[in-house]
Amino acid sequence: MSPVRSWVRRHPRAAAAARPLLAAVLVALVTYEGVALARQPTRPHAIVWCAGVAVCLCAVPWPRIPLVPRAWTAAALTWTATVLLLLDRPEIVWGMGEAIALLVLLSSVLLYAPARTAALLGPVLGLGCVAVPVRDADPGRFTLLFAVLAVVVSAYSLLMRAQSGQRIRDLQAVRTAERLELARELHDLVAHHVTGIVVQAQAARFTAVSGERAAESFARIEEAGSEALGAMRRLVRVLREGDPKTEPVAGIAQIRELTTRFSQAGPPAVLHVEPGLEERLPGDAAALAHRVVRESLTNVRKHAADATVVRVALRATAGGLDVRVMDDGSHAVPLTEQARGGGFGLAGLTERVSAMGGELAAGPGEGGWQVTMRLPLHPL
């Protein structure tokens, strides 16, 4: 978006007042010329005054009249008047208000018109502005002045158009990156919930449970399925929108909710957060910690069927933030290859952590498996 349009959106009342002000200035110039030319009423003087009024009215940004038709009309009128006046060569009859109005239209066309239209209509308006002083019997310095003004206005307008196009491309790149990020988020959420559903369904299938216990299992499966479906709907809705709106990222509070839900369907997850860490932890670091904990708990369900406890610890160190997720399991859940996934969860996390200057390690721990993240924190 160009700075002019950005200013118009931020200040609608001032923009509404600027429109009649521009019209008043242009009409005042033409009126002054009309009064001056009225001392010698001739046919060329009437042509100059009528063309000036019409072109100035075309230069005013009327809301219901598109820019391109107004610009073509002004170009046609000014060139018609120029051709007619060049046949008579009267004195002092070139029209300063008309030339200024053409500069206004030239800038608007080069900024906002489609590229092909601007490439054709821009030179017509620019040359028309330069040709206006040539109508006079002694054009002199005014022709040079408006030639320079036309070049300066054209260069500035094209520069602003290029900057606006670059902003649009940058915004599109940011939106594309955001959609890729949301796609990864969708994978993580669905993998977490669906893995829990599969584990609980297998437990209900291969374990002799009473009707009451079976009802509890099905209730947990229903809750996990509803959460997964809701998460998919929210994220897919954002992916489909043309202008996605971001929401607050997950943090320590969401890690607490995550471990609570995990404990309801699997081994108990014991969470320890160093006192005062939540207030001191930056939002991006808290969001990354949430992703590490979520992926680790998902892997516990997949790969540690006999785990009796999972310990999650977040604490500050001299170097930054330390996140550990440890379990005491040793046997994997017998999932199918489709349910196990492609094994890209930790790989993606490793890239994300590395991008923030941290380290992620996963390997055997105290009796089971351990995932550790060390992330440097910049002082606030």
Image (cartoon, helix red, strand yellow):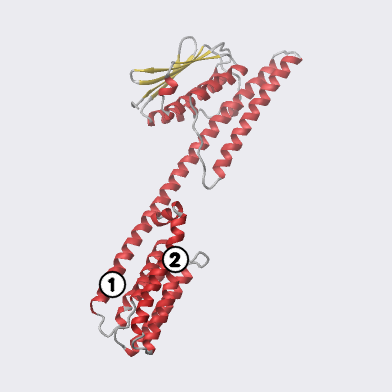
Q: Is residue 117 left or right of residue 261?
A: left
Q: In front: 176, or 26?
A: 26
Please identify the residue farthest to the left as the structure is shown: 141
Assign the N terminus to one quadrant of the image.
bottom left
Assign the C terminus to one quadrant of the image.
top left
Quadrant of residue 322 within the rendered picture: top left
Q: In front: 299, or 161?
A: 161
Q: What SS does tag 2 mark?
A: helix
Amino acid beneath label 1? Ala
**What residue sits right under mark 2 in the picture?**
20
**What residue sits right under mark 1 in the picture?**
147
Residue 211, given in percent of the width and then of the height, sits at 76, 15
Figure disc tally:
2
Q: In front: 73, or 232?
A: 73
Residue depicted at 69% across the width and 14% down the height: 207
Residue 101, given in percent of the width and then of the height, sits at 38, 71
Task: Judge whether 22 appears above or below 345 on screen.
Answer: below
Q: What SS does tag 1 mark?
A: helix
Residue 186, given in percent of the width and then of the height, sits at 55, 34
Residue depicted at 65% across the width and 30% down the height: 226
